[in-house]
Amino acid sequence: MENRILGLHHITAIAGDAQRNYDFYTKVLGLRMVKKTVNFDDPQTYHFYFGDGMGTPGSILTFFPWPRVRQGKNGTGMATGIGYSVPVGSLEFWKERFEKFNVPHGKISTKFGEDFLDFQDPDGLNLELIVPANKDERKPWETVDVKENVAIKGFHNVTLTLTNHKFTTEILTDVFGYELIGTENNLYRFRTSAVENAAVVDILEDPKAERGQNAGGTNHHVAFRVKNEETLMAFREKVIQKGLQITEKIDRDYFFSLYFREPGGVLFEIATDNPGFATDETVEELGSSLQLPDRYKDARAQIEKALPQLKQ
Ligand code: ZN
């Protein structure tokens, strides 16, 4: 178990306005901001992390909000859908809530025997709330408006759109240990038995679709979860054996990471559980103030001045 891929770790997407992004995820969806930091490669841009109360891997959606970003386009070679797990009986609540806040959404529908409601965030990012067929006992973050009986528990799945599923399937099954558990039309569902939740990857095969354009309202990368750095480095070898390029180990302060582009074009990351988000602030304080990596600490005043103001 310890040396396997443990489902999803986080997903990272691109947003426009920081305040609008913050308000949507914390107020409308009722997630917790578990970390407010900067893009480590571009400290004039925020990096927001939204998740459950602890910032548990498998619950974390992160954003780079770029105020003047151009609109991206979903297409092949990218993650085009993020599925959150919600409690049985909660979809009507969410439908009403989306109507109240003018959130674009579809009808409650079913795929792979699971009810879901699709919607878009203010930047046009595609998301779904899904009632998973399997039990989800993760404890969600609660807000005044979004109580435990309806609250988002974390990820259920991610959907990748690809011209051809074959080579990506090989990475998911041979390298990551997922199994194909079902198909519906041109949708292929994979699951890992290593974990109970955030264990599903769907591939939407669309040979005629255009290549996606990564900018506002699209996903940047999908991170898979491993226990520790030893397992991380073992996976580095496995990816290299498949003939793919992969980065060196990168210290992201809250986890250690490797990045590689899978053959279908999606940027994959593998990220560790350690050390987690409660390293530079306590669990109670998570997300309450701007955290900077060591190399930017001396430039705090300048960085804070350059970042857009955020009302929490
Ligand atoms: Zn990442």
Image (tube, rainbow, N blue to C red):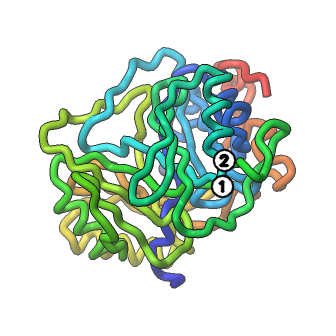
For the residue pair 165 and 10, the one nearer the viewer reads as 165
Q: Is residue 250 left or right of residue 72?
A: right
Residue located at (35% from left, 56% from top):
202
Q: Is residue 239 left or right of residue 146?
A: left
Q: Is residue 307 visible?
A: no
Q: Check if mark 1's residue and mark 2's residue have beta carbons within 8 Å.
A: yes
Q: Position of residue 36 (x, y in %)?
A: 69, 39
Determine the CA span between mark 1 and mark 2.
Answer: 6 Å
For the residue pair 252 and 312, the one nearer the viewer reads as 312
Residue located at (69% from left, 27% from top):
23
Q: Looking at the image, how many numbered discs can be counted on the residues?
A: 2
Q: Position of residue 291 (x, y in %)?
A: 72, 41
Residue located at (69% from left, 55% from top):
55
Q: Is residue 122 left or right of residue 139?
A: left
Residue type highlighted by circle 2: Ser
For the residue pair 199 and 18, the one nearer the viewer reads as 199
Q: Position of residue 11 (x, y in %)?
A: 49, 48
Residue located at (84% from left, 54% from top):
282
Q: Residue furthest bottom?
A: 1
Query: Ligand 1 near label 1 (Cβ, under 8 Å)?
Result: no
Q: Quadrant of the C terminus?
A: top right
Helix, strand or loop under label 1: loop
Classed neighbour count for the residue bearing mark 2: other residues with Cα under 10 Å, few (<14), some (14–19), many (≥20): some
Q: Is residue 267 left or right of residue 18?
A: left
Mark carried by residue 90: 2
Q: Residue furthest top?
A: 68
For the residue pair 156 and 267, the one nearer the viewer reads as 156
Location of residue 67 with respect to 222 vertically, above or below: above
Location of residue 167 with respect to 111 vertically, above or below: below
- According to the image, label 1 marks what residue? 87
